[in-house]
Image (cartoon, rainbow, N blue to C red):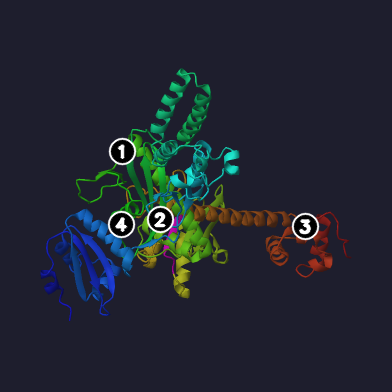
Amino acid sequence: MFDYKEELKKIPHKPGVYQYWDSENELIYIGKAKDLRNRVSSYFVKDYNVNAKTRVLVSKIRKITFTIVDTEIDAWLLENSMIKKHQPRYNVMLKDDKTYPWIIIKNERFPRIYWTRRIVKDGSKYLGPYASVSMMHTILGLIKETYPLRTCNLNLTKENIDAGKFKVCLEYQLGNCKGPCQNYQTFDDYEHNIGEITDILNGKTNTVIRTLKADMDNAAMNLDFELAHKLKRKFDLLEKYQHKSTVVNSSITEVDVFSIASEEKYAFVNYLKVMHGTIIQTQTIELKKRLDESDEELLTLAISEFRTRYNSTSKEIIVPFDIDLNDDKLKFTVPKLGEKKKLLDLSAKNVMFFKTEKIDQYERLNPDVRTERLLTQMMKDLRMNQLPKHIECFDNSNFQGTHPVSAIVVFRDGKPSKKDYRFFNVKTVVGPDDFATMEEAVHRRYRRMLDEGTELPQLIIIDGGKGQLSSALKSLRLLGIEKQMTVIGIAKRLEELYYPGDQYPLYLDKKSETLKIIQQLRDEAHRFGITAHRKKRDKSTLATELELIDGVGKTTSEKLLKYFKSVKKIREATVTELQEVVNLKQANAIALYFGQKNTPVS
């Protein structure tokens, strides 16, 4: 039997990493803490376990082990490496199955520079990885155009070159290589170029440009115009590249920038590596939540992962909110203004774009994912306690107080269910009384649903402000069902959402999907109401017109419309067809009225 109280006594008040094991002796969770005992004990406090997934995790714990470290930062790094190694069931899952490319400066005499996806520990320098392959090729293209380097794999030892073992190739003839294989380019000159290339790859383009400018001026002063022209070409290429790649002031020498965007089950974290105002590395990763982790927990994990992956030594980390990590060697900055805020905003744009793209991709493959996400978001935004799978919206329509109609449109799983649309001809209201009309429509609708045992909607939307909402609530209270669903009113002018009893309206973000669904419901109810109202009005007008025919009264005109469905069909009907509804005299009169298209029968 697992006795957590006895286990807790063994755990010290020290920073470290803790591991939870189940009855099968399988590692199910890894976490970090600046105080191991306090953190682990918090899992077994009843008030803490508000999340169902966390309660399941705690119920499976049968053993606790831990590793003590010197600092909180050490615990942070150790946690990340252990999660990657063991991938416990209840830890956040880093979804990143790509092998990103690196730029390699080969460990050899007269180093080659090229890209690779495979890292070999042979002393070569690897810069990257590059999440954007196009960015990597742009940089390699700049290097090739600016610094002619060898591309062959010859063993260019001093002895081999001095012995004359090699001959220059076509690359030399094309000007893409300076021929170090035949001592046409010195080792020192080649190494100087490699040093400048390394600076460019590390974002120190400004330093290289300053050096080139000085060398160019010296060449011009010494009347070496050919050299000055070559240096000027390099200078122009690098300056053009710098203008394209610099996003902030070059005084921001070395920082890491992170931003996060969360969903119900996933989170996305973007990373920017900035050197001298230039972004030299960028990537966005996806994290799958396991225990309803907070944004701070997820971002902390991602920061550790990125810094390890990119071998980052930046002392400053720009983040969107405060992070509870204490270390004298690291500075966490939450900028409000200036160049650093500009970087954070850029990172946020990247992560939001990535999130939107990923979610769209998931939802195209599985439409049910979108429906569930949309309904969950609506439930949160509208402060509901159940998913709004069935929504109904009411709208009244009349023309100068005549022919009033109440329309009801129905959405199921966020989509119109047109077969369930209904409209009511108002029976108990005299004159243009919008409130009384709404009261009658709501009462008739749900009285019938209760009588038939039909499932009630989770959300009712009333097109109108507080007055219409109050009228709808009167009917719901009378039926005793006002607490079984959420009822809101939407005012047209400012898209204000009113709740029963709330003094002030709720305003949703104009771009929110919840508001868009509500607007779609409102517009659909309005369209359907106008259509029903127009049909009723047209029918009334046609009935009045038929009554102008000699021998045709109100009852006869209604019979004709009911049988033929439209005045067009009445107009086109033969006398014989008309006699299915009226007598011969009336049929002849109708035929004569509509232009004598039908020959009267005597």
Q: Specify which label sits upstream in the sequence, 1 or 3.
A: 1
* In front of the other: 364 or 61: 61
Residues in magenta, as a range: 456-462
Report which residue position mark 1 lands on: 336
Report which residue position mark 2 lands on: 285
Residue 508, image x, y percentages: 40, 49
In space, the residues marked 1 and 3 are separated at their CA atoms by 82 Å
In space, the residues marked 1 and 2 are separated at their CA atoms by 25 Å
Which residue sits at x=41%, y=56%?
119
Q: Quarter of the image containing the N terminus?
A: bottom left
In space, the residues marked 4 and 1 are separated at their CA atoms by 24 Å
Report which residue position mark 4 lands on: 301
Horizontal placement of 11 versus 529: left or right?
left
In space, the residues marked 2 and 3 are separated at their CA atoms by 80 Å
Residue 172, image x, y percentages: 57, 40
Q: Amino acid at mark 1?
A: Lys
In space, the residues marked 3 and 4 are separated at their CA atoms by 87 Å
Q: Quadrant of residue 439 in the image?
A: bottom left
Could you tell me if the residues under marks 3 and 4 are in contact, i.e. CB atoms within 8 Å?
Answer: no
Element under disc 3: loop
Is disc 1 surrounded by few (<14), some (14 to 19) or many (20+) residues within 10 Å? few
Element under disc 4: helix
Q: Specify which label sits upstream in the sequence, 2 or 3.
A: 2
- Residue depth check, mark 4 versus mark 1: number of the one nearer the observer: 4
Q: Residue furthest front?
A: 163
Report which residue position mark 3 lands on: 550
Q: Amino acid at mark 4?
A: Leu
